[in-house]
Image (cartoon, rainbow, N blue to C red):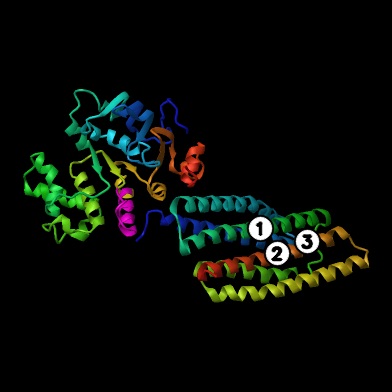
């Protein structure tokens, strides 16, 4: 039997999809801003952060309200907890995008353009594919995709370590602005964190679908 | 908002008040059961009364259609209850007419030992309606209104006593609708029903509020949370807190309300 409040769960799912899309968009814009020295995309990524934060708060409130007023059980209660946890992960992914964009803005303001992109592009392709797949496996309730996301996180971690090694070596060699290199190390770390949040999201979808 | 002797005006919606209670005191003999109650109930909203046994919520509900008149020792000690701007305790108020406007559904379903059709048609026949086409129309309309038509349309002439408990309760709601009330009072309408029948009655309440004002007494706090727009918490004859249901259950102002809804009472 459909209850009159079941549409509230659908609204919650819609909000979750929206925050996921915005977090992914913020990350994509931030990395593109870095790779193409594009201040406009960088600025747009920074601005998206407030929208993502507001959505996380809306999801938290709707979740607490549903638990309090609707007495959910089983898959409904799992959806609520996944919504709370996933929106937190997505908000953090949005924070990482915000951090990438702010550092890119610093570099562009100081240096005019980005000269050393190391493995940022390869990492970001992997990380955003993971995020996109995590969102799709939530939408399509696809357990197999969720499990494949976990495996790809290791490759992102490896590329981040490589970036760290290469940028540290360049710092040691000297003759360049250390600030830009340190900021690029942080950008690489932020992308690695976005992949971690995508992995968390996949774990949450597995819990939603299996209860385990 | 915490209850004081100041009238509660419910300014949060544009809907007009249909029930206005001011400084209402009520007693059974020497024992005062309700103390200085002030409350405004909005038209076409569901208002739930919650509180521990003996707190006065059912007594207060029964004041809205003067059911307490049937108890010899019951007495209004002060204040007034207005329904659609008429003080229902005025001398010239016709109680039968009042109860047509303020229908009631009880804890235990109480269909007449008649057919399903006759249960609905009963009130209209008493009012002198005899034309079969009119009765047929009202019976169908009320059974549809109570989400029962599809389940019973092929057995309207069978005894209502053969229906399940949940169906009997919805039949009583349909019967109450037949005389076109403005307000429906429900005194623990689901306490004898299983979870599925309860869910059906709750969904019915949600549908009915499009056309009727509903006041429901319930011991089931989750039910109050699920079905009502406003919730009033009573304790030992006093209205402790009355507010939007979201606020009562998510962030009550009064510590007594908090203690009751979180099970830390007593």
Q: Residue at x 25, y 38 (%)?
A: B182
Residue A136 visible in image:
no
**What separation in Å lies between label 2 and label 3 (alpha carbons)?**
10 Å
* Pointer 2 local density, CA inside 10 Å: few below 14, some 14–19, many at least 20: many
Q: Quadrant of the C terminus of chain A?
A: bottom right
Residue pointed to by mark 2: A193
Q: Chain of mark 2?
A: A
User: Do the residues bearing badges 1 and 2 touch, measured as CB atoms within 8 Å?
Assistant: yes
* Pointer 3 local density, CA inside 10 Å: few below 14, some 14–19, many at least 20: some
- In the rendered structure, the answer to whether residue A19 lies left or right of residue B44 reads right
Could you tell me what secondary structure mostly forms the magenta stretch?
Answer: helix
Q: Position of residue B238 (x, y in %)?
A: 40, 32
Q: Which mark is residue A92?
A: 1
Front residue (pair B162, B235): B235
Q: Residue at x 17, y 29 (%)?
A: B94
Front residue (pair B5, B14): B5
**Is B201 contained in the magenta span?**
yes
Q: Quadrant of the N terminus of chain A?
A: bottom left
- In the rendered structure, the answer to whether residue A34 lies left or right of residue B161 reads right
Element on which disc 2 rests: helix
Q: Chain of mark 3?
A: A
Above or below, B93 relative to B139: above
Q: Quadrant of residue A148?
A: bottom right
User: Do the residues bearing badges 2 and 3 touch, measured as CB atoms within 8 Å?
Assistant: no
Q: Which mark is residue A186?
A: 3
Q: Residue at x 77, y 56 (%)?
A: A103
Range of magenta residues: B189-205
């Amino acid at each position: 039997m459909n209850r009159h409040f079941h549409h509230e769960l659908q609204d919650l799912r819609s909000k979750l999809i929206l925050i996921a899309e915005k977090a992914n968009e913020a990350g994509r814009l931030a990395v593109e801003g870095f790779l193409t020295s594009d201040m406009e995309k960088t600025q747009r990524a920074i601005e998206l952060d407030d929208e993502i934060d507001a959505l996380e708060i809306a999801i938290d409130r709707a979740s607490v309200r549903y638990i309090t007023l609707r007495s959910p059980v089983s898959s409904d209660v799992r959806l609520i907890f996944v919504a709370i946890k996933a929106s937190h992960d997505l908000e953090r992914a949005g924070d990482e995008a915000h951090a990438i964009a702010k550092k890119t803005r610093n570099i562009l303001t100081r240096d005019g353009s980005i000269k050393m992109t190391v493995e940022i592009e390869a990492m970001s392709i992997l990380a955003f594919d993971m995020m996109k797949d995590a969102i799709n496996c939530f939408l399509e309730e696809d357990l197999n995709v969720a499990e494949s996301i976990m495996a790809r996180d290791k490759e992102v971690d490896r590329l981040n370590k490589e970036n760290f090694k290469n940028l540290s070596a360049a710092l040691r060699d000297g003759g360049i602005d250390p600030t830009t290199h340190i900021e690029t190390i942080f950008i690489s770390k932020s992308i690695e964190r976005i992949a971690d949040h995508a992995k968390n999201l996949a774990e949450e979808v597995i819990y939603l679908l299996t209860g385990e | 908002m915490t209850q004081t002797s100041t009238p509660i005006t419910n300014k949060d919606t544009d809907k007009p008040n249909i029930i206005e209670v001011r400084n209402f005191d009520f007693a059974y003999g020497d024992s005062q059961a309700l103390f200085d109650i002030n409350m405004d109930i909005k038209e076409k909203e569901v208002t739930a009364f919650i509180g521990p046994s003996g707190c006065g919520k059912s007594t207060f509900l029964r004041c809205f259609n003067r059911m307490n008149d049937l108890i010899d020792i019951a007495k209004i000690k002060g204040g007034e209850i207005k329904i659609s701007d008429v003080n229902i305790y005025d001398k010239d108020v016709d109680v039968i007419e009042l109860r047509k406007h303020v229908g009631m559904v009880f804890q235990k379903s109480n269909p007449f030992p008649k057919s399903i059709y006759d249960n609905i048609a009963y009130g209209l026949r008493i009012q002198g309606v005899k034309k079969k086409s009119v009765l047929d129309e009202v019976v169908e309309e009320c059974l549809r209104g109570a989400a029962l038509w599809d389940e019973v349309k092929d057995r309207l002439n069978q005894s209502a006593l053969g229906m399940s408990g949940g169906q009997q309760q919805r039949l009583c709601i349909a019967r109450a609708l037949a005389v076109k009330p403005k307000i429906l009072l429900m005194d623990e309408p689901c306490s004898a029903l299983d979870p599925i029948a309860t869910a059906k009655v709750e969904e019915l309440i949600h549908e009915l509020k499009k056309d009727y004002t509903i006041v429901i007494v319930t011991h089931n706090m989750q039910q109050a949370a699920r079905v009502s727009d406003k919730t009033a918490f009573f304790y030992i004859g006093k209205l402790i807190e009355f507010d939007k249901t979201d606020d009562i259950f998510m962030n009550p102002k009064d510590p007594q309300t908090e203690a009751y809804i979180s099970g830390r009472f007593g």
